[in-house]
Image (cartoon, rainbow, N blue to C red):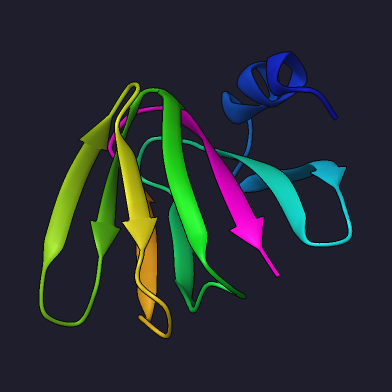
Amino acid sequence: MTIKKIILAIENANKPITALLSKGTKSKLIAIGIGKGILLKEHKAPGPTKLIVLRGKIEYRTEDSSRIFSELDEFQIPLEEVHSVLGKENSVFLLSVNN
């Protein structure tokens, strides 16, 4: 699935849409589309991960805090941090994961 297809699919999705865009021996690039009001459930990043918002607005939530990220914002997700992501608008973001 491409980023354009994810953008189109968000309108009718009732859960996050994920696509593995590339995978190497030490890294992978994942695209996630999330609609307004849709929650990506609590989880931990599988390794050092950078979040990059391409479109929309998301809320990154931890047990203690929350942060809003908008288009072109970047954030290094702390290792072992349990977090969830809520779509504040229809949004697409990338995760660059190092193994």
Side of 64 where 54 appears, left or right: right
- Name the spot of residue 76 as percent of width and height, x first: 36, 56
Q: Position of residue 17 (x, y in %)?
A: 67, 43
| Residue 87 visible in the shown view | no
Q: Is residue 61 left or right of 44 when viewed as pictured?
A: left
- Magenta region, main secondary structure: strand
Quadrant of image for the N terminus: top right
3 versus 88 height, above or below: above
In the picture shown, does residue 22 fall above or below 48? above
Residue farthest toward the left in the current orientation of the protein: 65
Residue at image x 24%, y 74%? Answer: 62
- Locate residue 31, reporting x and y percent: 65, 39
Q: Nearer the viewer, residue 32 or 9?
A: 32
Give the left or right position of residue 44, taking residue 32 as reference.
Answer: left
Residue drawn at (71%, 44%) of the image: 29
Residue beneath the point at 42% across and 78% down: 79
**Residues drawn in magenta:** 87-99
- Relative to residue 31, is residue 85 drawn left or right? left
